[in-house]
Image (cartoon, rainbow, N blue to C red):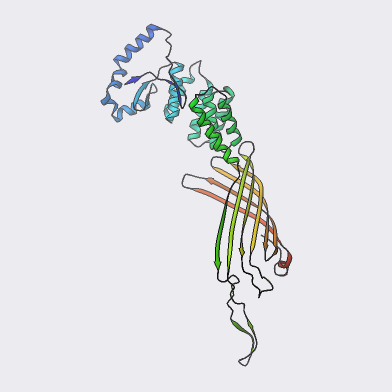
Amino acid sequence: MKHRLCLLFLPLCTVCLAAPSDDAADERRRLLDESSRQTQQYRESDWLDTEQAREKVEENNGYISIDGEIYQVGDTAEELESAIYHALNARQWHKVRQFAARYAKLPQHKPALIHLADALQKRAEGDSRAAENSFQTALEAEPDNPRLLLEAGRFYAEDNQNKESVAAFEKVLKTDIPAETHPIVENYLSELGKRRRWHGQISLGYGYNSNVNQGNGINQCVWEIADMCLMERTLPAPTDSTFLSYSATTEKTVPLKGHHGVQVRSVLYGNRYTEKDKDSAAMPDYSYHNSSLYAGYAYADARSSFSLLPYFEYDFRNRHTHYRAWGADVDWSRTLSPRWRINSHAGAKKTGYGGQSKDYFADYKQ
């Protein structure tokens, strides 16, 4: 069955426009020609079920299939705009290219729509840089176009350009969009807001260790002459204790322009043993607490991420400062496909021991 096409303004709003006829006689002749040629074959349902029919519709830039129905696309700007929007919504990129090529030849065509079609195609192909350029060109032509702003906001969100995405969605809400579209846009803004919040986790555990000091309590001869032990020593016996284990992490990324941002991260973990080793003068308390604070640069787009985070680390154990350390971590990753991702990590660290630990450990670089 053949139908005239309706113009799709937004994903949730369709507006039907009748194509004006410049000449009634021309319109009549066109209808008569269609009746005698293509119209008849598209009205035959058995023909529509054949693979050959579907292939002809795909190849013919004068028709589009929507939900199993065949629609004829005329030469007016209204019909071609409608066809382009329908093809974009259905992700029929070959039809988008067909209709965009016809539409671009019309003197009254809208350049923003051509660039929007190109931007969405490039995004689907994974070419984020070309898609961004097309979106920017389209927005320069029609900065208040709600459909364009909506698609640009989605693209910027996928490409981790959070400030640009928020600006586009907030501008959409100020335009004359259908009431049912408002919750969708507000949901996008809510999700983008979550990216700016603090994220983290905390865990607590309670356990028992039967040998905290890793001792065995055996007697050992250290000086033997003629099978006679002149000096022996007794190694520490195992010390058991219950303990509380904890860990916590927090992280926040403050978006800057484009893909750039400032990332802040903290890490805290440790064990607190309830029993002390009274027989050990060097280490009576085996509890330890470690904390680190990171702050630095972060980059993220649709497929890659990079971070350079200087940090300070503090380690407290045996009731005194064990060490302090300054360092920096560099992390890079790239998604190659839905199943494959490559990651690289590097770091540098300078550790300086404090308190009693200086008697047993030397400062080092890593």
- Where residue 133 sits in the image (x, y, percent)? 57, 30
Residue 345 as seen in the image, left or right of residue 88: right
Q: Nearer the viewer, residue 347 or 16?
A: 16
Q: Is residue 274 placed above or below 147 in the rendered structure? A: below
Q: Nearer the viewer, residue 109 or 88?
A: 88
Q: Identify the image quadrant of the N terminus.
A: top left
Q: Residue at x 63, y 55 (%)?
A: 268
Q: Identify the image quadrant of the C terminus.
A: bottom right
Q: Is residue 35 placed above or below 226 in the rendered structure? A: above
Q: Quadrant of residue 20?
A: top left
Q: Residue at x 35, y 19 (%)?
A: 3
Q: Is residue 203 placed above or below 6 in the rendered structure? A: below
Q: Quadrant of residue 27?
A: top left
The mark total stands at: 0
- Where residue 201 sits in the image (x, y, percent)? 57, 51
- Where residue 170 sits in the image (x, y, percent)? 58, 29
Q: Is residue 30 placed above or below 187 in the rendered structure? A: above
- Where residue 30 sits in the image (x, y, percent)? 36, 12
Question: Most extreme residue toward the left, as rendered?
Answer: 46
Q: Residue at x 27, y 22 (%)?
A: 44
Q: Residue at x 61, y 36 (%)?
A: 258
